[in-house]
Image (cartoon, rainbow, N blue to C red):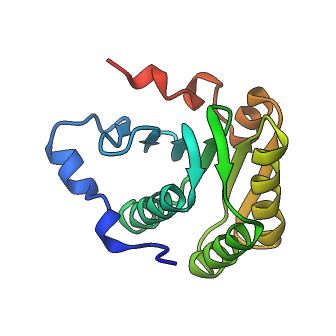
Amino acid sequence: MQIGAPEAAVNLHAFRRSGVSSQSMKFGFWSGVSFQPDLNLMVWQPRGILDEPHVEQLISLLEHTEDEVERPFNRYTDLSRLDAVELTFKYVLKVSLYRRLVYGERSIVKSAFYAVDRATARVALTHATVTAYSPLQVKVFLRKSSAAKWLGVSITDLELDRFTP
């Protein structure tokens, strides 16, 4: 397992120099992820098959962003556009324990998961259970509006498509 592999990291300074709006960043190398510094919010909407390599890439991006930005930020994961989940319980458990340990004593952040079926709910609920009583406050939602309310943003703020030119 190569969680947090440095070769998948994103240079946020390069995005700033390249003219990407400081109001929001869409990580073009890997569609489905945006960071909105004005809202302190990272949005991830994976598509296709959720498997270990995709999770590893996201964790690397997440850790790099945590190290680069000045303030802690909340996270929103929309699992509604997945075709399949190919993650074992053991892998999800391992990743969740890893994130709990690596995030450590940092400031409290909220991580909302929008799940629409049993497979996505299982992944999100496992992560929420393992990270309970840590600075990573994880909740699983069956409605986007409830997730938006808990995160203190609008439903529109949770949509990636609003950044597409």
Q: Is residue 156 left or right of residue 110?
A: left
Q: Whole-percent x and y of residue 127?
A: 75, 63
Taking the spot 22% from the left edge, 55% from the top edge, the residue there is 13
Q: Is residue 124 left or right of residue 85?
A: right
Front-most of residues 43 and 59: 59
Q: Is residue 45 visible?
A: no
Q: Whole-percent x and y of residue 123?
A: 75, 55
Numbered circles on residues, count: 0
Q: Whole-percent x and y of residue 38?
A: 45, 40
Q: Is residue 1 visible?
A: yes
Taking the spot 54% from the left edge, 37% from the top edge, the residue there is 47
Taking the spot 62% from the left edge, 80% from the top edge, the residue there is 104
Looking at the image, is 78 positioned above or below residue 163?
below
Looking at the image, is 94 positioned above or below residue 109?
below
Q: Is residue 160 left or right of residue 137?
A: left
Which quadrant: the C terminus? top left
Question: Which of the 4 image quadrants contains residue 159?
Answer: top right
Q: Is residue 116 left or right of residue 159?
A: right
Taking the spot 84% from the left edge, 66% from the top edge, the residue there is 129
Looking at the image, is 12 positioned above or below residue 145?
below
